[in-house]
Amino acid sequence: MEDTIAAISTALGVGAISIIRVSGNEAIPIVNKIFKGKNLEKVPSHTINYGHIVNGEKVIDEVLVSVMRAPKTFTSEDTVEINCHGGIAPTNKILELLLSNGCRLADPGEFTKRAFLNGRIDLIEAEGVMDLINSKTEQARNLAINQLSGKVSSLIRNLRQEIIEILANIEVNIDYPEYEDIEELTNQKLVPKIEKVKEEIKKIIKESENGKIIKEGIKTVIVGRPNVGKSSILNKLINEEKAIVTEIEGTTRDIVEGSVNINGIILNIIDTAGIRKTEDIVEKIGVSKSLELIDKADLILYVLNNNQKLTDDDRVILEKIKNKNHIIIINKIDLENKLDIKELENRQIVYMSAINNEGIDDLKQKIKEIFNLEKIMTSDFTYLTNARSISLLKQCLKVIKEIEDGINQNNSIDMIEIDIKRVWSLLGEIIGETYDEELIDQIFKQFCLGK
């Protein structure tokens, strides 16, 4: 991190203002070379300075330049931000001048990566930056802010502190067995301490399911036989005529996607091809995709026709989805009833007539109940949301299971200590106290350029 980096931090296009960010030891001298105004190397830190960006005697743009000296900056390095007029030509020209005067074009996420490597933020806070940029709802914004504030990180730090205290107690027992005033730590005395850590981890994982819903939304798949009204239901949910609706079976050959906001949670909806046996090659591919999406969905809306009896194909799908979150939609209730409701006992059912716009509110309410959305909306949003972090917590639970097995087998306490250290190390990976450089590079490559 000895070089000085530069990148455009705002979306490139026509706008009132663009911002070019520069960070590194030479940030201020490099910008000063192309700035006509006050001597930036002598102005106080955290000041905004009016002037012009020039290329020799040629004026490129009228600008405001913010000068911020280390360590009180986002990256903990000297940082300069050039506020120029929005537009592709002036913005690119200023960046070009910076690169020709000694800057290197920043990699995606490199500013945030430097903030992490310089110890200004931890890995959860860094991921919160990207979550804030990508947030689509007020709830997702609150979630990201909690990550940025360090509230989420404190959950992990507190767990690590509890484990450190256990490890310190073990070390004292191993290194100083002769001291009578030290409590002897036996395997059985470890049990409640390890149990407490396990329950706290399980609680974080359970609550993080809410965080995943807030951040990513609910992946919802609408499935059913051809011509039961799947596309009509999608159109009514998203309030847009996105899917083609006809009385001809097999109209939907490929997936059609849309989204709707329910209580601040995004429902990502996929309308699939009607599931039936078919000789049509294209329709076969669509049916195959529909079956694959069922396995990946958070919620399945299985649509049945009120005036048709259940078929063997229906029964196969009902069996396939029974252990997943699903709602049975009995559509076309305006038609004569021929469906035997007894076969659908103990299922979540909503009655609808998509053509008459009946039952949409009931469907939304049922979704709220299944995912407990009312409770999520009143929570404090202190959740882990990243799949990487949640996976590491689940690894911790597996190691704790090995610890418990070791205690039950009466393994020596110094052997059990090895596994306890593994838990401590895995928790460290979540906040970046311990990390693999290749993994860190991969995480920050997902960030946008200039952040």
Image: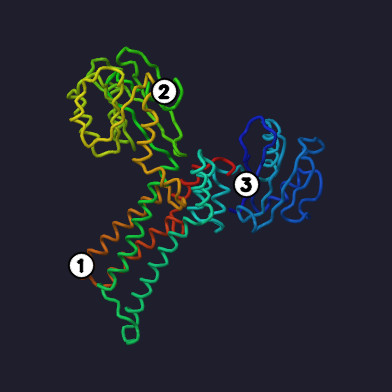
Which of the two marks, 2 or 1, is nearer to us in this view?
Answer: 2
Q: Which mark is residue 408?
A: 1
Is disc 1 placed on a helix, strand or loop?
Answer: helix
Q: Residue at x 34, y 30 (%)?
A: 221
Residue sitting nearer the eye, 179 or 146: 146
The x and y percentages for residue 77 are 63, 55
Which of the two marks, 2 or 3, is nearer to us in this view?
Answer: 2
Residue at mark 2 to residue at mark 1: CA–CA distance:
57 Å
Is disc 2 placed on a helix, strand or loop?
Answer: helix
- N-terminal-most mark, 1 or 3: 3
The amino acid type, in three-letter code, at marker 1 is Asn
Residue at mark 2 to residue at mark 3: CA–CA distance:
47 Å
Tags 1 and 3 touching, CB below 8 Å: no
Q: Residue at x 78, y 55 (%)?
A: 42
Please say which color scheme the image uses: rainbow
The amino acid type, in three-letter code, at marker 3 is Ile
Q: Which residue is mark 2?
A: 235
Q: Which residue is mark 3?
A: 5
Is disc 3 placed on a helix, strand or loop?
Answer: strand
- For label 1, count other residues whose C-alpha is less than 10 Å away and answer few (under 14), some (14-19) or many (20+): few
